[in-house]
C-alpha cells in the first residue's frame, strides 16, 4: 500500500497555491489534513499529479467571530474546533458533532475545510454546516466566491468546488437566541462513519412552539440532506408525539440510503428515523431549557 | 526532495521522493523502528507519533509535509531520561498494558500529550483518548489501568505540581480554545 | 515425574520483555535492515475463480528499479506447491496451493505475479504495468452451492465438494430420540472472520552463496516447523536453513502456517543472491492470510422431562476455502468441532458428521480457539434452545447436564479424556461474580423502565497442550508431540534458556524464567530466555494450541532439574557430603538444616568451566542440558471456563452494549496470574469482535467486501469492558506442576455468551432465536422477525444474510 508518485508544492501564500493549482490544469489536488486523501492514495484509488499542500498558508487557519458569524479557516484542525470556546458557546451543534468525527489523532490533523471539501455523505461536519445554513468561501485565480451549503454538496464525494478552487473558510451564521441543538448518530463503533445520523437545531417561543427548525440527515443519501418538509411541519407546533411522528415520517419518507456490509438500506432508513426523532426531541428540550434559563436571568 | 526535521531533539535530514510516507521515513531512513506500521489506512494507530507536539498518524503524512517540524517518536521517552522508563511506560509495565508490544509505541505517543495537559483518570475519558489506537492483544484493560496509574503518578507528584480540576467543565464547554483567535 | 516447588511460580512477576518493547527496541521482522535488500510486491488475483489465459509482464520488467518479475512459469520445478494431506485412513481429497497461481486462480487475493524491486514503492508501480487476462469461471461461494454440484468444482478433479468427511457414531440414537420427552432442533452458523494481529506477516530472506546458507527472518509462531516446510518446498537441505523469529506482533494462529509467500521470498533470495523482503500490507492480510470460523451446524437434541440431554445429533460444515493449509490440513476444523462439541455436558449418545468443503475463498485455518469458538457457539445455542423449549432457566439447565467432578477422569463420546476439573464449582463461581439472581432482578426492574438487558451464559472445556496421542488421532501430517528447552549455565553462573516455544505476546521470557528460577533456586535476574532462532535449540513445535507453558515450560523444568542435580553433585563432591543432604536455594547449594555450609552457584559454575579438577570424574565439564517434554500420555490437559455477560440492547437501533463480562476459569496451576488475566481478557476481546463486529463478507461474484479497516472492524477501547475474572486451580495429573494450557480460552465463549444475552434481552419484545454471529445491529433488529425456533419468515431471509 504505497502511493503512486506525484509532484509536491507547499506554497506560503494563497496566491501561490492558486497559481500552482491552475497550472496543474486539473491534475492537481489540494492536501489539507490528508486524513481522507492519503488513505485513498495509499490504496492507489487517488493519483493526483501534483499535490498542493495548503498547510503552510497562515491566512487559511483560525477560528473567529466576524459580524456575528463564525468563520473557520479551512485548515483549522478538527481538534482545535472541538476545543474552541467560540464554537462551544455560539455553535453548540458543531461542538456536539465533532467528537463523533473519527478519533483524537485523526482530528489532530484532519481539517474542517478538508472534511467539507471531501463531502463524505456521512461526514458530521458537512451535515452541521448544512443544518446551520452555512456557506463556504472559495478562491481561484479567477477570483473568490461563496457557495451556500445548500448548493455545495451535489453527490457522494462531489461538491460544486471546481478543480482549480481552494476552499478558504467555512462561515456559519449565528443561530437565533433560544435555539436548542442536538446531534445523534449510530455507528458500528464509536468514531466510525455513521450508519445514520441527524443534526437538529430548533428555536421555540415562550409557549414551546417551534419558530424555526432545521433538520439534517447524514448517511441517508449521497449527500447530507436538509429536510424542509419536516421543518415546515414543525414550525408553529409544540413537539407532541403526533407532531414528532409526522415530522420524522416527512423527513425519512423518500430516503434511499445505500446498502453495504454494515447495514442495508432498510436498516439505515429505520435508524435514520430513530436518529431524527431523538435529535428533534433533544433539540426541543434544550431550546426550552435555554429559554427557561434566560427567563430566570432576566 | 530534501526533508529536514528535528527528530527526538536532533536534526535529521534525507533526500526522498515526495511520496515517501512519514512512517517509512522514520523507520527506514532514520532507522528508528520503534514506530510501527499496522495498516497504512489510518485504521490502527500503531504508527502514531508526535508532530509539533500533537499525536498524529505517521502513515497518513508524507515526510515532505513535516519538513522543518519537530517530530517525536517513542524512542524519545526513555532517551530523554537516560534510558529510564517514563512514568507512563512504568505504568504500562506495572499494569500489564502490553503483550506483543506492537501497538504500544502508538499508545504511548497518543497518551503522552493527553496526560501532559491534565489528569486523565476517568474511564470514559481514557477510552476516548485511546479509541484511535487498536490493541489486538490486551483487550485494553491493562492499558486503561496503566493510564490511570500514570495519571496518578504524574499529577500527584509534588515535583510535577498539580493543576486545577480540568474535568469539571460541562459537556459543551471548551477545554483549551487552542484554535480560537 | 520431578516435582515443582513453586516460589516464583504463582507470583505476579512483572514482565522481563517489557522494557525493550516499551522503549521501541523490540525487533520485529520489518525492523531488520540488511544491506542491498530488495523488496517484493505481489499481484494478486482480482477474480475468485478463473483460468489464467495470459500474463504480460514485459512493461513491468522494463521499469527502472525493477530487478525481477516472476510468474508460475518461472517457478516450475524449482519450488513445490503446498500440499497438506491428512494421514490415512480417512475420506480425503487433496489440493495443491501453488506458490504463484498456475493456470487457474481459486480465490480473490491468490498470488499471481511477484515483482522484485529496489523499493516497495517501485515494486507496486510495476504491478500496475502487468496485464493478466482471465477466463472467468462461475465461483463457488457457499457450502450449499458447493454441495449442489457446481458447473466447475474448485478443484476440477474432485468427485465431491469436500476435502474431508468424518463421522462419529456413539450409541443407539434413533431409539433415544424416539423415546425422548422432547426434541429441540436448530441450525446455527458462525461468520467468517480472522486473527488480524496488529503486525501483518513479513519475511526477509537472506542467502549467503559462500556458505550456501539461507537465513529467513519471519513472523512465525513455529520456527522449526517452518524450517522443515521451507526445506521440503524449496528442495534445500534443512541444515542450510535458519529461521529467525524474534519479536512478533501477535499471531493468534494465523502466523502458524506455511504460506506461499514464505517459499516464494526464500526462493527469490537464493535466486538473486541478495536479501529480499516482503511485508504484507493490511489489504493483503485480509485477502491472503488465512481466514477462520465459518461453520454451519444442523443440531438436534433429545431430552427428558428434567431437561437432561439424552442425545445430540450434529451435522457440521466448514467453509474451508480454496486450499488445505500446512501443517494442519483442512480436516482440523471439522474434526475438532465434532470432537469438542459436547463440551462440559454429559451427553451419552452422540452422532455427528463433519465436512470441510472447498469454496473460492481464502483458505481457512486455525485462529485462537480453532474450532472451539464455533463448536461452543453451536452447543450453547442448543442449550439455550432447550432451555427455551423446556422452560427451564438457562443456567439451571446447564447445571443439570454437567459432567460432575466425581465422574473425573471422564471420557467423552468423542474419546477426549478429561483429566480433572469441577465444572459445577466453576459455574457457581461465575454466577457468584455476576450475582446471577440479583442481576435477573435488575433486568426485570429495568424492563419496566423500557430498558432491555440480557444475560448470556457459555462454557467450554479446552483441550490444551495436546500431545502426540491427540494429533495422531487427528491424522495431521505433522505431530506436535513435544517441545524442547535447552539451558546453559555459563562460567559466570548466568543462565541462558532457549525454549522452542515462541512468544508473540504471551510473555515466555518471564514465565519460563520463573519456572527455571524455581528449579535452579536462583534469582530471575540471572536468567535470560531467548527464543525464535532455529540455530539455538534442537527441535520443537512452537507456540500453538495453548501448549507453551505445559510443553516448553515442562521441558525447561526438566532441563533445569537435571542441571540442578549436576550443581548438587559438584557441590557434594567439594563439600564432601552426600548429595542427598544438599538443597538448592537463594543462589547456593547448601546442607539441609545447616545453611552456613554452602557453595554459591556462581562458584560451582566457575568450577564446571575452569576447574575441571573440582568436578566429579563421572561428570562432563560445562553445564548444558537439552530436554524435550510431551506431557505423557499426550491426551492433553483440560482447562475449562464459564463465561457470563450482561448486555443492553437498544431495541430501536439493534446496537449492543456489553455492560459486564465475567469469566470463571480453571487452567490448573497458574504460573503468573497477571499474564493469565491478560490472556483471558485479550481472548475475550477477540471473541467479542467475532460476536459483534468482525466478519469477512463476499458478494455473489466472489469479491470480498471487507478489504479495508473501514469494513473489517476490530474492537476498539470502547467495545471491550473490563473482564471480571475468577480462578479455580484443579491441577492436571498429567503435567509437570499440574499446569494446564491457556491463552486461547478467552476467545472461545464470547460468541455463545453474547448471542444468548442478546436473545435474552430481545425476548420480551418478541425477539426470536439468534442463529448467527456477528450480531450486527441489523441482525439484532431482525430478531423481531424470527420465531423462537429459529425459522425466518421468508420475506426476511434477505436481511438475515
Ligand atoms: C480512520 C478514519 C476514520 C474517520 N472517521 C471519520 C468520521 O467518522 N467522520 C468524518 O467526518 N470523517 C472521518 N474521517 C475523515 C477525516 O475527518 C478527514 O480529516 C476529513 O474527511 C478530511 O479532512 P482532511 O483535512 O484530512 O482532508 P484531506 O484528506 O487533505 O482532503 C480530502 C479531500 O478534500 C480536498 N480538500 C481538502 N482541503 C481542501 C481545501 N481547503 N480546498 C479544496 N479542497 C480541499 C482534497 O483535495 C481531498 O480531495 C476519518 C478518517 C480516518 C482515517
Ligand atoms: S499504520 Fe497508521 S494507522 Fe495503521
Ligand atoms: S500488545 Fe499486541 S497489539 Fe497491543
Image (cartoon, coloured by chain):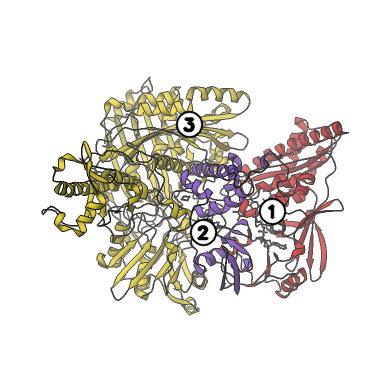
Image location (x, y in percent) of residue C310: 33, 26
Position of C758 relative to A256 (above/below): above
Q: Residue at x 33, y 43 (%)?
A: C336
What chain letter is assigned to the residue under label 2?
B
- Judged from this view, the residue extending furthest toward the left is C617
- Judged from this view, the residue extending furthest toward the right is A298
Q: Residue at x 48, y 31 (%)?
A: C456
* Residue that label 2 marks: B79
Classify residue C629 as left or right of residue C269: left
Alpha carbon distance from label 1 to label 2:
32 Å
Image location (x, y in percent) of residue C131: 49, 72
Disc 2: CA contacts within 10 A as few (<14), some (14-19) or many (>=20): some
Chain C drawn colour:
yellow
Whether residue C790 can be seen here = no
CB-based contact (under 8 Å), mark 3 and mark 2: no
**Which element type, helix, strand or loop, lies under badge 1?**
helix
Q: Are marks 3 and 2 on the same chain?
A: no
* Residue that label 3 marks: C456
Chain B drawn colour:
purple
**Which element type, helix, strand or loop, lies under badge 2?**
helix
- Residue behind label 1 places its C-beta within 8 angstroms of ligand 1: yes
Q: Quadrant of the N terminus of chain C?
A: top left
* Residue that label 1 marks: A78
Classify residue C344 as left or right of residue A171: left
Give the number of callouts.
3
**Which element type, helix, strand or loop, lies under badge 3?**
strand
Q: C276 or A87: nearer the eye?
A: A87
Chain A drawn colour:
red
What chain letter is assigned to the residue under label 1?
A
Amino acid at each position: 500500500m504505497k502511493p503512486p508518485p506525484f509532484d509536491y508544492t507547499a506554497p506560503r501564500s494563497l496566491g501561490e497555491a492558486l497559481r500552482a493549482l491552475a497550472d496543474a490544469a486539473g491534475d492537481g489536488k489540494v492536501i489539507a489534513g490528508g486524513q481522507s486523501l492519503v488513505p485513498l492514495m495509499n490504496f492507489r484509488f487517488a493519483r493526483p499529479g501534483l499535490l498542493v499542500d495548503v498547510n503552510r498558508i497562515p491566512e487559511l487557519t483560525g477560528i473567529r467571530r466576524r459580524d456575528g458569524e463564525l468563520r473557520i479557516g479551512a485548515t483549522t484542525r478538527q481538534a482545535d474546533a472541538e476545543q474552541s470556546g467560540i464554537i462551544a458557546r455560539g455553535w453548540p451543534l458543531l461542538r456536539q458533532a465533532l467528537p463523533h468525527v473519527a478519533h483524537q489523532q485523526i482530528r489532530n490533523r484532519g481539517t474542517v475545510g478538508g472534511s467539507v471539501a471531501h463531502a463524505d455523505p456521512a461526514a458530521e461536519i458537512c451535515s452541521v454546516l448544512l443544518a446551520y445554513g452555512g456557506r463556504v468561501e472559495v478562491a481561484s485565480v479567477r477570483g473568490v466566491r461563496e457557495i451556500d451549503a445548500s448548493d455545495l454538496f451535489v453527490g457522494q464525494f462531489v461538491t460544486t468546488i471546481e478543480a482549480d478552487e481552494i476552499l478558504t473558510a467555512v462561515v456559519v451564521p449565528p443561530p437565533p437566541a433560544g435555539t436548542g441543538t442536538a446531534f445523534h448518530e449510530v455507528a458500528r463503533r464509536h468514531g466510525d462513519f455513521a450508519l445514520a445520523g441527524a443534526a437538529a437545531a430548533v428555536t421555540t417561543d415562550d409557549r414551546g412552539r417551534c419558530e424555526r427548525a432545521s433538520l439534517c440527515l447524514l448517511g441517508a443519501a449521497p449527500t447530507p440532506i436538509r429536510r424542509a418538509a419536516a421543518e415546515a411541519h414543525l414550525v408553529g407546533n409544540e413537539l407532541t408525539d403526533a407532531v414528532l411522528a409526522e415530522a420524522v415520517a416527512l423527513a425519512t419518507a423518500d430516503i434511499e440510503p445505500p446498502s453495504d456490509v454494515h447495514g442495508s438500506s432498510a436498516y439505515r432508513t429505520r435508524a435514520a428515523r430513530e436518529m431524527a426523532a431523538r435529535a428533534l426531541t433533544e433539540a426541543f428540550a434544550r431550546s426550552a431549557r435555554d429559554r427557561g434559563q434566560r427567563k430566570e436571568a432576566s | 526532495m530534501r526533508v529536514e526535521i528535528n527528530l527526538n531533539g536532533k536534526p535529521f535530514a534525507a533526500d526522498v521522493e515526495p511520496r515517501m510516507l512519514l512512517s517509512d521515513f522514520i523507520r527506514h531512513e532514520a532507522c528508528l523502528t520503534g514506530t510501527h506500521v499496522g495498516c497504512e489506512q489510518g485504521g490502527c494507530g500503531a504508527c502514531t507519533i508526535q508532530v509539533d507536539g500533537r499525536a498524529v498518524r505517521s502513515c497518513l503524512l508524507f515526510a515532505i509535509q513535516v519538513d522543518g517540524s519537530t517530530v517525536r517518536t517513542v524512542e524519545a521517552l526513555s532517551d530523554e531520561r537516560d534510558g529510564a522508563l517514563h512514568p507512563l511506560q512504568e505504568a504500562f509495565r506495572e499494569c500489564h498494558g502490553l503483550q506483543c508490544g506492537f501497538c504500544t509505541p502508538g499508545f504511548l505517543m497518543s497518551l503522552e500529550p493527553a496526560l501532559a495537559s491534565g489528569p486523565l483518570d476517568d474511564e470514559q475519558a481514557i477510552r476516548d483518548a485511546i479509541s484511535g489506537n487498536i490493541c489486538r492483544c490486551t483487550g485494553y484493560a491493562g492499558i486503561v489501568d496503566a493510564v490511570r496509574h500514570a495519571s496518578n503518578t504524574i499529577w500527584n507528584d509534588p515535583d510535577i505540581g498539580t493543576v486545577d480540576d480540568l474535568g469539571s467543565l460541562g459537556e459543551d464547554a471548551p477545554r483549551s480554545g487552542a484554535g480560537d483567535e | 515425574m520431578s516435582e515443582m516447588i513453586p516460589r516464583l511460580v504463582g507470583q505476579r512477576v512483572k514482565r522481563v520483555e517489557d522494557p525493550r518493547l516499551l522503549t521501541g527496541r523490540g525487533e520485529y521482522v520489518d525492523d531488520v535492515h540488511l544491506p542491498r535488500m530488495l523488496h517484493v510486491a505481489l499481484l494478486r488475483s482480482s477474480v475468485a475463480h478463473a483460468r489464467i489465459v495470459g500474463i504480460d509482464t514485459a512493461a513491468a520488467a522494463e521499469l527502472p528499479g525493477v530487478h525481477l518479475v516472476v510468474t508460475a512459469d518461472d517457478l516450475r520445478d524449482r519450488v513445490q506447491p503446498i500440499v497438506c494431506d491428512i494421514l490415512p485412513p480417512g475420506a480425503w481429497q487433496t489440493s495443491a496451493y501453488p506458490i504463484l497461481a498456475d493456470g487457474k486462480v481459486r480465490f480473490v487475493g491468490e498470488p499471481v505475479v511477484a515483482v522484485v524491486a529496489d523499493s516497495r514503492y517501485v515494486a507496486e508501480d510495476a504491478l500496475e504495468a502487468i496485464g493478466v487476462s482471465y477466463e472467468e469461471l462461475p465461483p463457488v461461494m457457499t457450502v450449499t452451492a458447493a454441495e449442489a454440484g457446481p458447473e466447475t468444482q474448485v478443484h476440477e478433479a474432485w468427485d465431491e465438494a469436500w476435502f474431508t468427511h468424518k463421522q462419529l457414531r456413539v450409541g443407539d440414537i434413533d431409539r433415544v430420540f424416539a423415546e425422548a420427552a422432547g426434541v429441540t432442533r436448530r441450525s446455527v452458523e458462525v461468520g467468517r472472520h480472522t486473527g488480524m494481529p496488529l503486525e501483518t506477516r513479513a519475511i526477509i530472506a537472506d542467502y549467503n552463496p559462500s556458505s550456501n546458507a539461507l537465513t529467513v527472518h519471519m513472523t512465525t509462531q513455529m520456527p522449526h516447523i517452518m524450517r522443515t516446510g521451507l526445506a521440503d518446498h524449496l528442495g534445500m537441505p534443512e541444515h542450510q536453513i535458519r529461521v529467525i523469529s524474534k519479536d512478533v506482533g501477535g499471531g493468534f494462529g494465523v502466523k502458524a502456517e506455511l504460506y506461499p509467500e514464505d517459499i516464494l521470498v526464500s526462493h527469490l533470495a537464493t535466486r538473486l543472491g541478495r536479501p529480499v523482503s516482503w511485508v504484507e500490507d493490511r489489504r493483503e492480510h485480509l485477502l491472503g492470510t488465512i481466514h477462520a470460523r465459518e461453520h454451519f451446524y444442523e443440531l438436534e437434541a433429545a431430552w427428558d422431562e428434567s431437561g437432561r440431554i439424552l442425545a445430540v445429533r450434529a451435522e457440521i460444515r466448514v467453509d474451508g476455502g480454496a486450499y488445505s493449509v500446512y501443517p494442519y490440513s483442512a480436516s482440523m476444523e471439522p474434526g475438532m468441532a465434532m470432537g469438542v462439541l459436547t463440551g462440559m455436558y454429559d451427553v451419552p449418545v452422540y452422532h455427528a458428521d463433519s465436512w470441510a468443503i472447498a469454496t473460492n475463498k481464502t483458505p481457512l485455518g486455525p485462529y485462537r480457539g480453532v474450532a472451539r469458538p464455533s463448536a461452543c457457539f453451536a452447543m450453547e445455542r442448543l442449550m439455550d434452545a432447550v432451555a427455551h423449549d423446556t422452560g427451564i432457566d438457562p443456567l439451571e439447565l446447564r447445571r443439570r447436564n454437567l459432567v460432575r467432578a466425581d465422574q473425573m477422569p471422564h471420557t467423552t463420546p468423542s474419546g477426549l479424556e478429561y483429566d480433572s476439573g469441577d465444572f459445577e464449582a466453576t459455574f457457581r463461581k461465575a454466577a457468584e461474580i455476576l450475582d446471577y439472581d440479583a442481576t435477573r432482578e435488575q433486568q426485570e426492574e429495568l424492563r419496566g423502565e423500557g430498558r432491555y438487558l440480557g444475560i448470556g451464559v457459555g462454557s467450554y472445556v479446552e483441550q490444551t497442550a495436546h500431545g502426540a496421542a491427540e494429533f495422531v488421532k487427528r491424522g495431521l501430517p505433522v505431530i506436535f508431540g513435544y517441545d524442547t528447552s535447552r539451558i546453559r549455565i555459563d562460567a559466570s553462573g548466568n543462565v541462558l534458556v532457549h525454549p522452542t516455544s515462541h512468544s508473540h505476546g504471551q510473555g515466555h521470557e518471564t514465565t519460563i524464567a520463573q519456572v527455571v528460577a524455581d528449579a535452579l533456586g536462583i534469582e530471575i535476574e540471572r536468567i535470560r530466555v531467548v527464543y525464535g532462532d532455529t540455530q539455538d535449540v534442537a527441535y520443537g513445535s512452537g507456540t500453538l494450541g495453548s501448549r507453551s507453558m505445559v510443553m516448553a515450560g515442562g521441558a525447561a523444568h526438566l532441563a533445569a532439574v537435571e542441571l540442578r542435580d549436576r550443581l548438587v553433585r559438584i557441590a557434594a563432591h567439594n563439600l564432601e557430603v552426600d548429595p542427598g543432604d544438599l538443597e538448592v536455594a537463594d543462589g547456593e547449594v547448601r546442607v539441609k538444616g545447616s545453611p552456613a555450609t554452602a557453595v554459591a552457584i556462581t562458584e560451582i559454575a566457575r568450577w564446571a568451566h575452569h576447574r575441571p579438577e573440582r568436578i566429579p570424574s563421572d561428570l562432563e565439564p560445562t553445564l548444558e542440558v537439552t530436554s524435550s517434554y510431551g506431557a505423557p500420555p499426550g491426551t492433553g490437559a483440560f482447562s475449562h471456563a464459564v463465561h457470563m455477560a450482561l448486555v443492553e440492547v437498544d431495541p430501536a437501533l439493534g446496537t449492543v452494549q456489553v455492560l459486564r463480562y465475567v469469566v470463571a476459569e480453571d487452567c490448573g496451576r497458574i504460573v503468573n496470574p497477571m499474564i493469565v488475566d491478560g490472556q483471558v481478557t485479550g481472548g475475550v476481546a477477540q471473541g467479542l469482535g467475532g460476536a459483534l463486529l468482525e466478519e469477512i463478507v463476499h458478494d455473489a461474484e466472489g469479491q470480498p467486501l471487507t478489504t479495508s479497516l473501514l469494513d473489517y472492524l476490530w474492537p476498539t477501547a470502547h467495545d471491550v469492558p473490563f473482564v471480571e475474572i475468577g480462578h479455580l486451580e484443579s491441577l492436571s495429573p498429567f503435567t509437570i506442576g499440574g499446569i494446564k494450557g491457556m491463552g486461547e480460552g478467552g476467545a472461545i465463549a464470547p460468541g455463545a455468551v453474547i448471542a444468548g444475552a442478546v436473545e435474552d434481552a430481545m425476548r420480551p419484545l418478541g425477539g426470536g432465536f439468534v442463529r448467527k454471529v456477528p450480531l450486527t445491529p441489523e441482525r439484532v433488529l431482525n430478531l423481531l422477525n424470527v420465531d423462537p425456533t429459529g425459522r425466518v419468515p421468508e420475506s426476511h431471509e434477505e436481511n438475515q444474510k
